[in-house]
Image (spheres, grey):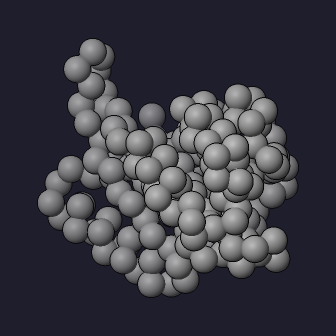
Amino acid sequence: MGRTMIFVDANNFCQGLNRYYPEYKVQVQISKLISLLSEGRQVIKIFYYLNAFRTRKEDIAKQEDFVKKLEASIPNLKIKLFAMQKRKDAPGYQEKGVDQELTMDMIWESDNFDTAILVSEDKDFVGCVERLIKDKGKKVEVVIPIFGAGHHLRNVATRRRILSVSQIEGIIKKGKRLS
C-alpha cells in the first residue's frame, strides 16, 4: 500500500458522532481510531486537528500537557490545536482555520505519502482531494461513519471507507451529556 498519512478533522468527525448519539457526550479514543485506520499500513505521520475549548490559563496548560503526553504515546502523531473564536453573527463559538491548515498540510506533505486517509465529512476538502488525485497521482481514502453524510467527498475519493456502528462503538467512550 505504500506510505500512508492520516488526517483527522476531529471536530467534524465528533460532531457527526454526537448527532448520532445525542443522549451522550461522545469522546473519540484517538489511539483506537488510529489503530483501526492503520491496519496493515505503513503510517508515517498522523495529523489530528483539534479544537481547544478551554479559555482559562490553567485549563489551557492542562490541555497542552494532555496533548504532549498523547503525542509521546502514539508514534508519528502530531496534534494541532485551534482556538475557538467567538461568533460575530450569532451567539457561541466557531472553529477557525482548521480546514485551511488541513488542506495546506495535505498539499505540503503530498511528496511524502502515496495514500492519504482523510477522516471528515466536510465538503470543503473536495477541491484538495481532487487536486491530490488528478495533479499529484495520490490515492485519497475518505473515512466517514455509516450514518454520516459526506457524499461530496465520497464521490471524489479513490476509496471510501464507511465505519460500521460496531467499529465506531470500538473507538468511542460515551459519557454523560451535560444539559
| Quadrant of the snapshot with the N terminus | bottom right
Q: Residue 144 at x, y = what percent?
A: 72, 44
Based on the displayed image, in which of its 4 quarters is residue 156 positioned?
A: top right
Q: Which one is in front, 114 or 86?
A: 114
| Residue 79 to residue 70: above or below | above
Based on the displayed image, in which of its 4 quarters is residue 170 positioned?
A: bottom right
**Camera sees residue 122:** no
Q: Which residue, as the protein is rendered here, is positioned at the far front?
A: 135
Residue at x-position 31% and y-position 32%:
93
Residue at x-position 31% and y-position 27%:
92
| Residue 16 to residue 143: above or below | above
Relative side of 11 to 30, left or right: left
| Residue 75 to residue 111: above or below | below
Q: Residue 148 at x, y = what percent?
A: 73, 35
Q: Which residue, as the protein is rendered here, is positioned at the far left?
A: 57
Q: Residue 112 at x, y = what percent?
A: 57, 70
| Residue 134 to residue 1: above or below | above
What is the number of callouts on the image? Answer: 0
**Camera sees residue 111:** yes
Residue at x-position 75% and y-position 74%:
2
Q: Which one is in front, 2 or 100?
A: 2
Relative side of 75 to 105, left or right: right
Q: Residue 172 at x, y = what percent?
A: 66, 58
| Quadrant of the snapshot with the C terminus | top left
Based on the displayed image, in which of its 4 quarters is residue 56 positioned?
A: bottom left
Residue at x-position 33% and y-position 50%:
82
